[in-house]
Image (cartoon, rainbow, N blue to C red):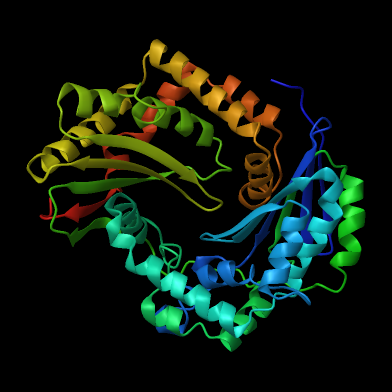
Amino acid sequence: MSPAVPLHTMNIGEMPLVVETVSDSSTATVVWLLPVGSAGDPTDAAGEGESAMLAEVIQRGAGSRDSRTFCDALDLIGVQRGTSSAMHHIAITATCLVEHMPQMLALLTDMVLRPTIGEEAVEAARDLALQTLGSLRDDPQHYVSMLLGGIAHPAPFNRHGYGTEAGLMACTQPALRAAWARRARPGGSILGVVGGVEAAQVRKTLEPLLSGWSGHAEETRESAPARRGTAFERQESAQTHMCIGLPAPKESDSASMLHRLVVRVLGGGGMANRLFSEVREKRGLCYSVGMDYAAGRDRGLSSIYAGSTPDRAAQTIDCIRSELRRMAEGVTPDEFERAVIGLKSSTIMNGERSSARATAIASDIHRVGRARTLSEVVAQIDLLTLESVNAYCRKAFSGSALDTASLAVVGPEPL
């Protein structure tokens, strides 16, 4: 792994800016997180889906440029870009050659401070959003994970983010313009930059561009606890899709890295894990099984997906639950060594991608309160021991801990 690179965190007005300089890089990547996430959307017919609509429409014209000329201006300097909406933020991601960084920042600032949000753009964005909403059930593996989120997270953080038909229809041009002016504020925004740039130069470029931008976005608060239990949606099919959700450590928790390693042993890292071996290979109960871990600022969630046939679905869930209980016995030395190597390799390889690093350092500010270098994250892995992992397993996978699990099912029959 290359030596640790400089990380500089500073404020531009009310917004944190974190820059990681990679001296031998000829590109620069920006990830701009804006506090316009789906959890803060109005409810249902009042405008649910607002965040998804805004993520699309802000790309369609900004400043004095209409949609075509704005895209042309970005294309002219070779900017690869995209926007996405998530629970807490809209993320703008953009990469260009270092020499074009000032022009790119000027254009992105127009997108954030002066989006056109024209009538035609709003109608086009709504059509796309309605098509996406209408097609969600066509991907049952994704859909069952959305159902799980609806019962495993507290409200309003349990929204899937695609909105409702009534909510999307309520997202008119005046409503979206007012929402952006209210929600897209520097207080709550975070800007991460990675590449062959110096922090001082980035700051010097941004300060005049962001002059006069002020205010704080309203913090979204929990309004109801997670429902947990079971969610079922009938879908006539030859397959049953299942997702188990388990509360997990938040990112700032000292146990978060322990949990990542345990997830790798249990159901991550390709085929060398317990769930794949025990549920799929040895017993042939399902055609797909795996486990993920999402660690946020306030909470975390582990999710296990399995796809099976209706006649074997109940056995599949029973076998998964048996493996979860068996984790309380701990992991073997071989499993520990393999998981450490895999976790470190994936961390380092992911860190070589500038977009992933820019996302990581910006997300760190939100989830942890400070940005971490790649070397610091790898050092956390090196501190793990077989003893500490097994002590965590005894606590995290005891019978009482598993009582808080949630289950979502999409298929012809409930379990």
Q: Nearer the viewer, residue 85 or 406?
A: 85
**Residue at image x 46%, y 14%?**
337
Q: Is residue 242 left or right of residue 123?
A: left
**Residue at image x 41%, y 65%?**
159
How many labels, in total? 0
- Splitting the image into 4 quarters, where does residue 307 fall? top left
Image x and y of residue 236, in percent: 13, 58
**Residue at image x 70%, y 62%?**
189
Against 320, residue 211 (above or below) is below
Q: Nearer the viewer, residue 389 or 7?
A: 7
Q: Is residue 256 left or right of residue 145?
A: right
**Residue at image x 91%, y 47%?**
200
Image x and y of residue 217, in percent: 66, 71
Q: Can residue 40 be seen in the rendering of this structure?
A: no
Against 227, residue 260 (above or below) is above
In the rendered image, the residue lying farthest to the left is 311
Image x and y of residue 11, in percent: 83, 56
Q: Is residue 7 left or right of residue 251?
A: right
Against 121, residue 255 (above or below) is above
Q: Nearer the viewer, residue 134 or 68?
A: 68
Q: Can residue 366 be seen in the rendering of this structure?
A: yes
| Position of the N terminus by quadrant | top right
Q: Is residue 117 left or right of residue 132?
A: right
Image x and y of residue 197, in percent: 85, 42
- Splitting the image into 4 quarters, where does residue 231 fall? bottom left
In the rendered image, the residue lying farthest to the bottom is 174
